[in-house]
Amino acid sequence: MRDLLYKNLTSADRSRRVIASSETADKEGVHSVVRRHFACLVKQVESDSVFKPEPYLYVLKERNTKLKREHFFCKIKGSILAVNKGKLFLILFVHTLNIELTATDNKLSEQAR
């Protein structure tokens, strides 16, 4: 069985956008949940007052054999400067990926032996 959830949210002035998806699946004794999230914000800036934040990367990987669980998380933040019709824009974005895998029965533990 597989469940999908998808959200696409945009602000009224179109300066902020959030896209999120979640997928849940049970296959071959493994319950998996995959969540993806993307958000971006567009700001018009003056060329003399541009503050561009530093990029950011965070990765976490956990494996617990006693609980038969694996978890992976990745977060990326960044920014881009863009010009459109002579105006300067700062685009801030963040991506996250969250994956959880858990065993739903003992077939996996018997195969590992």
Image: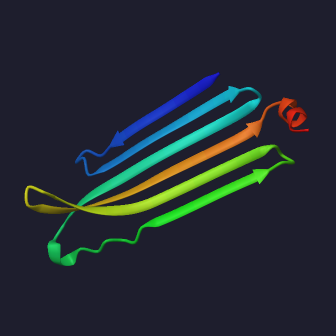
Which quarter shows the N terminus? top right
Q: Is residue 28 above or below residue 20?
A: above
In the image, taking residue 106 as reference, residue 33 lies left or right, namely left
Q: Residue furthest bottom?
A: 48
Which quarter shows the C terminus? top right
- Residue 93 in the image: x percent, y percent? 37, 56
Residue that appears at 54% across and 48% down: 97
Q: Is 87 in front, or is 65?
A: 65
Q: Is residue 81 above or below residue 33?
A: below
Q: Is residue 110 above or below residue 74?
A: above
Residue that appears at 21% across and 77% down: 49
Q: Is 20 in front, or is 102?
A: 102
In the image, taking residue 112 as reference, residue 90 lies left or right, namely left
In the image, taking residue 80 as reference, residue 26 lies left or right, namely right
Instruction: State the image quarter where residue 8 is shown.
Output: top left
Residue that appears at 61% across and 25% down: 2
Residue that appears at 72% across and 47% down: 70
- Residue 108 in the image: x percent, y percent? 83, 34
Q: Residue furthest left?
A: 86
- Residue 21 in the image: x percent, y percent? 49, 38
Instruction: State the image quarter where residue 42 is shown.
Output: bottom left
Instruction: State the image quarter where residue 27 is shown.
Output: top right
- Residue 31 in the image: x percent, y percent? 71, 33
In the image, taking residue 23 as reference, residue 30 lies left or right, namely right
